[in-house]
Amino acid sequence: MTVDQKPLLAANWKMNPVDGGEALALVKGLLPVASTYVDRVEVALFPPFPWLLGVAEVLDQTGVKLGAQDCFWETSGAYTGEVSPAMLRGWCQWVIIGHSERRAYLGETDDMVARKVAAALGTELSVIMCVGELDDHYEAGKTDEVVAAQVKAGLALCSADDSARLVIAYEPVWAIGSGKSADPEHAYKTMRLIRRVVGEVIGAGAARKVRVLYGGSVTAANVESYVELPLCDGCLIGGASLRAAEFAQIVKVTAEVYGQR
Ligand code: PEP
């Protein structure tokens, strides 16, 4: 993270809430706190596609950012069900690519992730690329090997010029939605590895602008233990981001920790 950049808190709502009115109520609930701290913490909300437009209207002029949970690599054409980066540009600033749920349930490969990352960055969106090891990898001590390979493959087509709009989220798959958050020491070591690999792929200078997040069962109770890590530039939050008061507390804690740096 450079001096011009802020820590990032990314709220991944996944396929929630089912009701559009609830989506707007959630934004309105967290907005007073999130907008109060926009000078210290970058907050980005990632609702499901159908709620993006309504949420964009509520976020207008607040400084809180909006993102999509995925996008395709082509701009237009015969790709039923897909949404292109060009369709998001203008009212979304962010997109998440390669979330482990997409890799697990929708067969998203490293090659697809690389194409999506390059297309989104090329369309001037900011990208959070997710990487992380499965439980079996973790138990077998293969975290570094797996995560390094995902980072290398995912960045294979991207340009170093876009590094300020690139974020890598380290999300151990076994920690996502499980309540089993990673030991901060493990998170720290893996984020350090990610930084090294990013430097190898796009060059050390460009890599300094790439923010690295932790994700996996982050709550208001444990967020401090991650954001206080020297190499951690914020968090990707799923479940706790659906609770407005808890997410607001996460924003507050993060602002306080980075305010003391
Ligand atoms: C996520 O959706 O990427 C995530 C980390 O979820 P949770 O915070 O619920 O573990």
Image (tube, grey):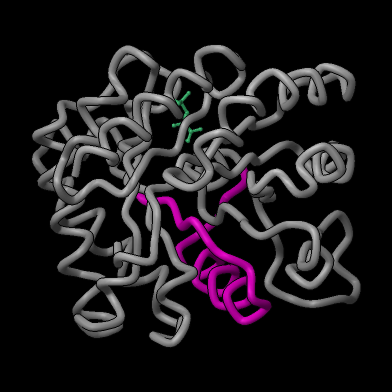
Residue 5 position, x and y percent, is: 39, 61
Q: Is residue 128 magenta?
A: yes
Extent of the magenta region? 106-131
Identify the residue at horizontal 33%, vertical 71% (top origin): 209
Identify the residue at horizontal 40%, vertical 79% (top origin): 156
Q: Is residue 78 above or below residue 20?
A: below
- Whether residue 18 sits left or right of residue 234 in the image: it is right
Classify residue 134 by image quadrant: top left
Residue 42 position, x and y percent, is: 50, 47
- Whether residue 73 sits left or right of residue 190 in the image: it is right
Residue 233 position, x and y percent, is: 31, 49
Q: Is residue 51 magenta?
A: no
Residue 196 position, x and y percent, is: 15, 68
Classify residue 41 by image quadrant: top left
Q: Is residue 20 above or below residue 190?
A: above
- Whether residue 186 sits left or right of residue 157 in the image: it is left
Nearer to us in this view, 144 or 230: 230
Q: Is residue 123 above or below residue 79?
A: below
Identify the residue at horizontal 80%, vertical 47% (top origin): 60
Nearer to us in this view, 1 or 133: 1
Check the picture and name the quadrant holding the C terminus. Answer: top left
Nearer to us in this view, 130 or 145: 130
Q: Is residue 184 above or below residue 145?
A: above
Identify the residue at horizontal 52%, vertical 64% (top origin): 113
So how many labels did they put on this image? 0
Classify residue 171 by image quadrant: top left
Check the picture and name the quadrant holding the N terminus. Answer: bottom left
- Whether residue 253 sits left or right of residue 72 in the image: it is left
